[in-house]
Image (cartoon, helix red, strand yellow):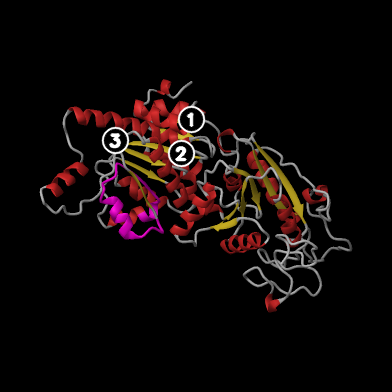
Amino acid sequence: MTFESLGLHTSILRAIADTGYTTPTAVQAQAVPAAIAGRDLLVSSQTGSGKTAAFMLPALHKFAAASENLNVANGKTPNQERQSARSRGERPRFQAAKPKMLVLTPTRELALQVTTATDKYSAYSRRVKAVSILGGMPYPKQMQLLSRNPEILVATPGRLIDHMESGKIDFSELEILVLDEADRMLDMGFIEDIEKIVAATPENRQTMLFSATLDGVVGSMARRITNEPLIIQIASSATKHENIQQKVHFVDDLSHKNRLLDHLLRDQSLDQAVVFTATKRDADTIADRLNIAGFAAAALHGDMHQGARNRTLDSLRRGQVRVLVATDVAARGIDVPGITHVFNYDLPKFPEDYVHRIGRTGRAGRKGLAVSLVNHAESINVKRIERFTKQLIPVDVIEGFEPKKSAIAMRSPARKPSGWKPGDKRKTGNSFGNSKPGQRSFSKPNAAPRSEGGGYAGGAAKSRFGDANGNRRSFGDR
């Protein structure tokens, strides 16, 4: 199958040829013709499957055809009317933007990725303008973008609600509504915002919803906002990433974990990598340590200003950043072909997030490697991921970095410590000596207590990220 066989407009086919795409992906082959026919769509497809083009190409086709009809009728677009008013010396007043298409995304990064892809696909399309409206961007800049009355609006729910309530956006002429990664938006608590946005759009709109799963709350919402939708299930979120090799490395403690990460990042086959952390603070700290160790690293998380996030992502795409240390939300939507490795420095809270994380590599059918660094007390979380993905993740051991406990012992149920007897309240299966869930301290005698920031209180010489006795300077050394 070719893109020509999908019935797309010639201007779009020309732009697709420039991008180097030759054959539609499975989701594009099914979704594009149905969307061109005006069908509502419910699509379950894994990350990296080409879903952005699946909803954007048919929309651009529709706008290109409408533009030709407008030329025949010698009509003018709203932007052309404004230009005519300026030429007559009239001062046009601000009018609410009336987009023809709205794409809702859970994160700023994904919104920018969709906008960038749209610019590529519409390179030869006249009268099509796509803009991003999202948190972290100055309001004056957004007002300037909205004043152009863009045909395509890509937005995060929170900031979009702000402009709707201030009268800056009018959806009365909206023709197409897309919810991208709907499951993630619901996980982030946007359901009320989404319902408010949907209620402001015309009932006769075309709706396309893309999600890792169409079950539960997502499925219930999807049925409410669509009209006799075509359901397309290319691959569920639990589908095997056959092009991504997955591994688990068990570690004894944080020093062991950091020395192992340093070693793995020096792999000659590594082009670019993403290291996932559980907290924003750890993302900053680990990125700093990696830079000191000689890696071209940068952090990406939600506390960064949008300008800084954009610069970091641009540096990643240009190859100036080799290792990106990120949290889940910040890394959502990153699509960089050069990412060959993904490291789970901390396991995600939910198995679904594991699938999205490893999907940052192996994009568009390329090969990738996903490595999880796991303390033996977290082995139950590995099992949850395996149950969700319906596949076992092999355990790997590198000579010189062997854990003190064998992989078999780590993957077996927690055992009682030697000397245990009924009534003994000591914790089992946890080398960090947890006294309460979520709290951990090293069990080594006389170890200084850790501060909230991950370092040691009282200016202790030990580093959270290092082996103070190491002979070579690495990520694990201070």
Q: Is residue 331 above or below residue 212?
A: below
Apparent side of residue 467 relative to residue 270 in the rendered image (left or right): right
| Residue 111 placement (x, y as % from top left) | 43, 47
Magenta span includes 332 = no
Question: Which is nearer the eye, 308 or 114?
Answer: 308
Q: Earlier in the sequence, mark 3 or mark 2?
A: 3
Could you tell me if residue 248 is visible in this image? Answer: yes
Q: Is residue 352 above or below residue 10?
A: below
To which quarter of the image does residue 404 belong?
bottom right
Q: Which residue is mark 1?
A: 21
Outermost residue toward the bottom?
458
Apparent side of residue 366 relative to residue 177 in the rendered image (left or right): right
Question: Which is nearer the eye, 404 or 143?
Answer: 143
Could you tell me if residue 9 is visible in this image? Answer: no
Residue type, label 3:
Arg
Residue 210, numbered circle:
2
Q: Is residue 33 above or below residue 246?
A: above
Residue type, label 1:
Tyr
Quadrant (top left/top right/bottom left/bottom right) for the C terminus: bottom right
Q: Which residue is mark 3?
A: 126
The magenta span reads: 135-159
Mark 3: give few (<14), some (14-19) or many (20+) Cα within 10 Å. few
Residue type, label 2:
Phe
Measure how far apart labels 1 and 2 are at the Cα level.
Answer: 21 Å
